[in-house]
Amino acid sequence: MDTVNSVRLLGAAALSLLLAQGAQAQETLKLGLSVPLSGAAATWGLGMEWAAEQAVERVNAEGGVTANGKTYMFDVVAYDNKYSATEGARNAQTMLNRDGVKFIAGAIGTAPVRAMQALTERNGVILFSTAWGKSVKGPEYPYTFTQMNTPFEILEPFYTFIKKQHPDLATAVLISPNDATGQELEPVAVETWKGLGVEMLASDWYERGTTEFQPIATKIASLNPDLVDFSAAPPTDVGSILKELDVLGWDGVKVMSAGTSVDALTAVAGEAAEGAYLGASADFDSETATDVQRELNANARKALGEPLNGITISSYDAIMALRAAILAADSVDPTKVKDVLPSVRFESSYGPSGFGGEAVYGYPQQMLIPVIVTQVENGKAVELTRNNPAELEALLND
Amino acid sequence: MELFVQLLANTLQIGSVYVLFALGLTLIFGVMKIINFAHGAFYTAAALIVTSVVPFATATLGLPLWAGYLLAAIAAIAVVLCLGALVYSLGFQYVLKDLNGSFILSIGLLLVLNGAYLAIYGGAPRSVPQILPGTISIFGATLTAQRLALVIVAAIVTGGLYLLIERTRLGLALRAVAQDQEAAMLQGMPYRRVALYGFMIGAGLAACAGVLMAPINAVTPVSGDEFLIKAFIIIIIGGLGSVAGAIVGGLFIAVVESVGGYFFDPSTATLAMFILVIVFLLVRPQGILGNAE
């Protein structure tokens, strides 16, 4: 073979390799994440990114997902939304316009999610979020799905359980972060406590990014309520307030509706966090956890240095829901996937799951998972009770 | 009575950190006539170093906690001073008295440093064990021994800086350059060297604040940025470039935060601070103790 032919052969081989790579790249589905990777809520974002990577690894190891005769591999792209609307909007623009993302497997924070919806709903991009606000759901947002329990699922069973544990509870103070999440949670929390016969002595707001919590703690201590509910405050902020309250000698019932990361909480508050009730955490090492959760949790401890919680594990469940919906729709067209998602059945980390919530939100876009109440004991989250929502019970018995 | 003593204690606790942080920022403005938006990054660097050196010193070197913290404090301040010297010689010395240039440079530097901290330390909050455990009661007000130590050290550092500014040749040079750079140069003062010293002292003060706060608050790669906004409010109210103004402004903002946070709520107190800034900019733009130019 002469030199010219050799060069031609090599060129052809290189070209076919490039084309093959191009064809393979087209069969990768990018799954976006818009989560806080820095700041007080970073533990949520980092955990969610890690859980999403585990789900993607599992799906890809099982051969990916096949739709319309093509096999697709998942890939995760995570962006830091700093828990702000500005960054949420910027993330959405980057994901949709630059990276061509059609499926967002996790977004944290009502404000950034609201900002993202302006683009995702208009462009027909599926958005899974942990946003607690009711305003991000409804028939006008058919591409948005919630991947974890929110106040409308959590608060009533959570507060009722606490009231049963402490029947003498009569007074409370609510501390909420002054953002979209806090503003939407506050009236629900106040009403639910009132319904349980607990008087709200004060409902105060603070700005995310606050560095000094003595004024809040001084006010709480002077009101001396039986209970303090920290609403949607992240664990590090709650830890700082609990530490100050401990200094001032207050020792009542501590409630974190958005209580998730026990390690972050105890790292800041130390023993002052003992006894706190958490509404969005879970003991994924317990006997009631599934094998998947126990395995994920053990690996998360090694990789992240802390266990998973209700927020962080939700990206795993969203990706499992997406896989099931793509298979059911036999398409990667987000509109077709969106149409089958409300009726799809899938295996979440909690076990069999689906979507519901039409009676509350007007559209079945709420992932159905158990409500788990945990308490900090010796620096660990210990599961006290878990309740399946009625729709999940019906699904399990179906 | 007890309540007012507690509010006063809160004010001193909050104010002492704000003063340390704002002093560095105002000193750099006074000498170099620039706004350093990356000032918080010096605070963050020091606090992050403390969170990594303390566990290393106690667990690996077997030092007692206080010795580990002392070692971490020295390491943190040394690293921040080196970082300060590096960014001054590579960047800030070329934008002296250039507000636009320094704005672009310091914002860019802030992004680079925040990205570096995130890559090195991750975004999760980090903490340091309390060096001085226990609480102290003074006239009915309760505060931790750690916080009391912070207030005392901050007061000593602030007093030391005041003496340096008022009683030493370097202080005289810093004041002269801050008042009239050209006149100072005509008197033979080496402006660039004085500016470097001013910048290094400012960075050192931010590092001190970071070292003192690390055992008290959770540390993240953006911790310093959260103090930066308050520090801007303080130096605008106290007077840009005024050392005494930073002290008065820091304590004033601490009063607003402490008293306003108690009688209203923390969000209202924050809102009040921004309204105060607007009022000062409209009515007395030079601040309480600044010079009108």
Image (tube, coloured by chain):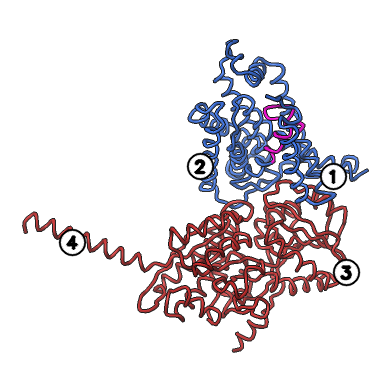
Chain colours: A red, B blue
Kindly indicate whether the residues beneath marks 4 and 1 are on one polypeptide chain: no
SS for dot 4: helix
Q: Tell me the chief SS of the magenta region.
A: helix
The amino acid type found where label 2 is placed reads Val
Mark in the foreground, 4 or 3: 4
Mark in the foreground, 2 or 1: 2
Tag 2 subunit: B
Q: Is residue A283 above or below residue A238?
A: below
- Image position, residue B20 (x, y; %): 70, 33
Query: Label 2 belongs to which residue?
Result: B112
The amino acid type found where label 4 is placed reads Ala
SS for dot 3: loop
Residue at 69% x, 41% y is B230
* Label of residue B142 in the image: 1
Query: Label 3 belongs to which residue?
Result: A168
Instruction: Tell whether label 1 touches label 4 (CB within 8 Å).
Output: no
- The magenta segment: B230-249
Instruction: Tell whether label 2 touches label 4 (CB within 8 Å).
Output: no
Kindly indicate whether the residues beneath marks 2 and 1 are on one polypeptide chain: yes
A168 left or right of A65 in image: right
SS for dot 2: helix
Tag 1 subunit: B
